Image (tube, grey):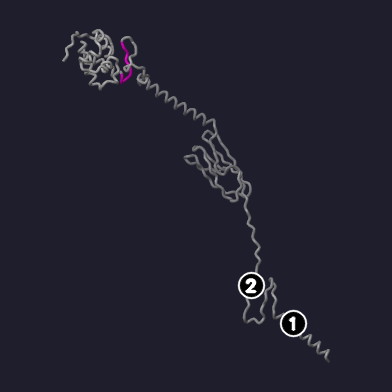
Amino acid sequence: MFKSKFKNRTITETLTAGDCLKRRRIESGLSTKEIGEKLGIRVDYLDGLEGGDYKNLPPQVYVRGFIRSYSNFLGLDADQVIKIYNREISFRESGIGKNKKGKDVDIARKMNLGRFFVVTPKILTFAMGFVVMLAFGYYAFHQINSFNSKPYLFIESPTGDTVVSEKNITVVGKTEKDVILEINGQEVSVGADGYFRQDLVLSSGRNLLVVEAKNRFGKTETKEINAIYEKIEENTPMIEETKEIEISDDDPSPIVIIEEEIVSSSVADTDIAKNISSDEETVSEITQ
């Protein structure tokens, strides 16, 4: 293994691992290219170590090996430099660190505000308190608004005043689920979703339907519907009756029906016979 000609030095300042390596290399008057050729490490890896650009380096196990070889070559305490590197990696995962001068040190050497946000117990307590206050404020606003406002009431059917030809009518609508609903003084049940449905019987003529919803604060909302029930009377058609008379075969005098006037043919024959007899008597007198 290559033996360094430099003496070991103890790092007394709080620097990054890259700062330690770079400072020592500059003091030695060497370039990363020269050191890379002697150690067999790619120059871009050495530049990444010195610049703290660890995201473009191989996995950490290899990076620690590079740091140990680089530190030994420059005469630095390899264990101490690796310890600094481990601290940097820890800062990278948890947030930011501070150097000796009190300046913030971003491990990636870039200002990325997303890395600086750390959830502390104090921040968590504040956030929880804010959420509780927000929920309480919303609840209080809802209660005050409910106390001052009338309940919601909407009639789906019938829509406004209506004229019907049937005496049965169905009222359908929606309101708040915790209200007391009445139609013409009769309480109507309301479903969990706020919908209600009630069948009513109408009287002839005009019927006033009063729908009233009352919430627990005593606020009421009223809807009125005029339902006019008009019964349609059916006209009975006039049917001309035809009288049917049974004619028996044994009856010697058949009956003839003409426009509901019944004339007996036997009676007519009798009258004709009388007239003929009278005429014969008159001719006989003249002849004598």
Horizontal side of 130 relative to 23 (left or right) equals right
User: Which span is picked out in magenta?
Assistant: 92-99
Find residue 42 and report its image quarter.
top left
- Image location of residue 193, percent across then percent down: 47, 39
Of the two numbered discs 1 and 2 in the rendering, the one whose residue sits closer to the viewer: 1
Going by the picture, which residue comes out furthest to the bottom? Answer: 288
Name the residue at 21% across, 8% down. 9
Seen from the viewer's position, the closer of residues 7 and 84 is 7
First reached walking from the N terminus: tag 1 or tag 2: 2
- Image location of residue 164, percent across then percent down: 60, 49
Horizontal side of 8 relative to 177 (left or right) equals left
Determine if the magenta segment contains residue 282: no
Badge 2 is on which residue? 244
Horizontal side of 136 relative to 231 (left or right) equals left
Q: Which mark is residue 16?
A: none
Badge 1 is on which residue? 272
Seen from the viewer's position, the closer of residues 30 and 146 is 30
- Image location of residue 11, percent across then percent down: 24, 9
Q: Say how many tags the image has.
A: 2
The amino acid beneath tag 1 is Ile
Q: Quadrant of the C terminus?
A: bottom right
Determine whether the residue tagged by mark 1 lies in a helix, strand or loop: helix
Name the residue at 52% across, 38% down. 175
Determine whether the residue tagged by mark 2 lies in a helix, strand or loop: loop
Find residue 31 and report its image quarter.
top left
Going by the picture, which residue comes out furthest to the left? Answer: 1
